[in-house]
Image (spheres, grey):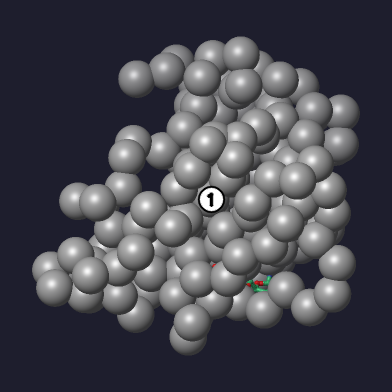
Amino acid sequence: MISLTLASPAQTRKLARALAVRLRPPALVTVEGDLGTGKTTLVREVLRARGVRGAITSPSFTLAQSYHGREGERLHHLDLYRLSRGADAELFAWDDYLGADAITFVEWPAAGSDALPAPDVRIELDHRTRNSRAARISGEAAFEQGLAGAATEAGIAVAAEASS
Ligand SMILES: Nc1ncnc2c1ncn2[C@@H]1O[C@H](COP(=O)(O)OP(=O)(O)O)[C@@H](O)[C@H]1O
Ligand SMILES: [Mg+2]
């Protein structure tokens, strides 16, 4: 796991761009954190960096929005805040949003935890001050190393931690 301090929304977007170049389909990325911690800010910038043009709306009401990236990959952005565990989650068309050619981002993944495979990348965001956020990111060792290096180069404070 790597821990970062995102000192501003601009730093969150820089982290997103570093993430964007390190993701390859198929990938499942979960994004956890309270309201306003920057989950949508982060995902939206990843989508932009992968070539999505036009409006990128938050899927808080629609549950899911799908796009195409510039390499032909499917990009899915889910927000499960309003999905309840149980019947709702069982009826949800998970398979439509996971596939060999897809990179899938899931805000509020808890409601889908019985249906979703283990994430390739797990991101947790926390409030620090009005404009700063703490981020913890877990993935494969090489992914974490590469991301930590890119974040440092982008001026983001990174603290390495023993993996658990
Ligand atoms: N360091 C930061 N990173 C991301 N967003 C931040 C940061 N500091 C302040 N903000 C603000 O917090 C809000 C985050 O909103 P949003 O991305 O929709 O959060 P979430 O999807 O987690 O509810 C935005 O208004 C953004 O400008
Ligand atoms: Mg959101």
Left or right of 114: which side holds 55? right
SS at circle 1:
strand
Q: Nearer the viewer, residue 164 or 68?
A: 68
In this view, the residue in front, 111 or 146, is 111
At a point 63% along the width and 54% down the height, the residue shown is: 75
Disc 1: which residue: 104
Q: Can you give x and y, in whole percent of width and height, for residue 30 in the image?
A: 46, 49
Which residue sits at x=76%, y=51%?
Answer: 69
Q: Is residue 85 above or below residue 100?
A: below
Query: Does 5 appear above or below 82?
Result: above
Reply above or below: 113 against 34.
above
**One can see residue 150 in this view:** yes
Residue that lies at the very extreme toward the left in this rendered image? 86
> Residue shown at 14%/73% (left/top)?
87
Q: Quadrant of residue 150?
A: top right
In this picture, residue 4 sits left or right of residue 9: left
Q: Is residue 8 visible?
A: no
Q: Residue at x 84, y 54 (%)?
A: 51
Spot occupied by residue 83 in the image (x, y as percentages of width and height): 30, 75
**Quadrant that contains the C terminus:** top left
Inspect the image, locate mark 1, and give the three-letter code of the amino acid beneath it.
Thr
Expressed as whole percent of the image width and height from the top left, the position of residue 9 reads 76, 62
Q: Quadrant of residue 59?
A: bottom right
Number of labels in the image equals 1
Q: Residue 114 in the image: x percent, y percent?
A: 19, 51
Estimate how packed mark 1 is, as few (under 14), some (14 to 19) or many (20 or more) residues with alpha carbons within 10 Å: many
Which residue is more in the foreground, 20 or 150? 20
Classify mark 1 as within 8 Å of ligand 2 or not, answering yes or no.
no
